Image (cartoon, rainbow, N blue to C red):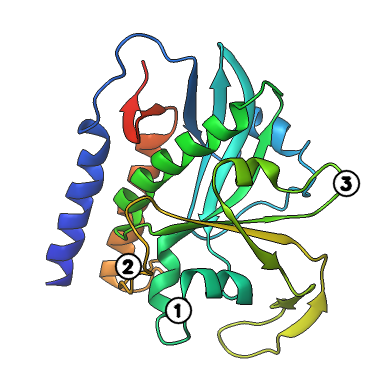
Amino acid sequence: MARDLVSEQEGNSANAISRLQYHRGSSDLYLESCKLTDRRYKDIRDRHYVPNSGACGQQFHFLIHYDDEIVGIISGGSAVYSTRNRDGFFRITNTIRENALNGIINNTVFRLEDTESNLATLCLSMWRSIVSYLWEAAYDVKVFGFETFVVEADYRKGTLYIADNWKFTGETSGSTKSHHGVGLTGGVSKREKSQPKLIFCKWHKDHREPIDQVYESSWRNETPEQKARSRRLERFRKSCVGRKFCAVKNKVLLVR
């Protein structure tokens, strides 16, 4: 039964790209799926105000193309495990936390180096449509929301998220739990101070309730099913790299 489910999910992922139509004509704005190690991505990532410490967990990364130039990057990753204001907005309880969090995408990085008016809002809107489509195809979960965390400064208030109708839900507590030295056989996590961040959240257009859904992780890579799932994810990610996407009225399209 488990192998049949993995085979079905692999078929769904493999067909996710082939089902997409091509955008007719040219698109001035589109996103190119790329690897975290792509030099073009890394060059811009290293100029972001948050230090580049890599990424782990679920993730998709994109180059932002506009008027035939690469003008920025944007990424989606796994939701943070727990933060009170985010949990309150999405009504995440301890009962559903483990299953629901996979349906929230964290906008982990967004750097735009073109300051044209309204471009940031257009990028965010397009990214939400594209990353949701790829996320659901890759991880076989429904996306119901988005989150992001902004380090406040005089010139950084999260206004581009507000322009895209994200909701400011409060600030983080200014501490985080460190898991250095914690392994499967033991260890002690400890709470460390961190810089408070502004929290912005947004529901997916099709949802207003959290979704309690089972997600079969493959990070342990121990059982035959986990190994098969890991291979499926790797094949799908590779099939996405270099693909160019745009979104018109929330419909995801390929760009030639």
Q: Is residue 177 above or below residue 119?
A: below
Q: Secondary structure at mark 2?
A: helix
Which residue is label 1 attached to?
Answer: 97
**Mark 2, other Cα within 10 Å: few <14 / some 14–19 / many ≥20:** some
Which residue is label 2 attached to?
Answer: 226
Amino acid type at image mark 1: Arg
Quarter holding residue 43: top right
Residue at horizontal 57%, vertical 34%? 121
Task: Say if residue 220 shows up in the picture.
Answer: no
Residue at horizontal 62%, vertical 45%? 161
Quarter holding residue 224: bottom left
Task: Say if residue 120 shows up in the picture.
Answer: yes
Residue 12, image x, y percentages: 20, 48
Residue 125, image x, y percentages: 48, 37
Q: CA distance from mark 1 to mark 2?
A: 22 Å
Q: Is residue 92 above or below residue 116?
A: below
**Mark 1, other Cα within 10 Å: few <14 / some 14–19 / many ≥20:** some
Amino acid type at image mark 2: Gln
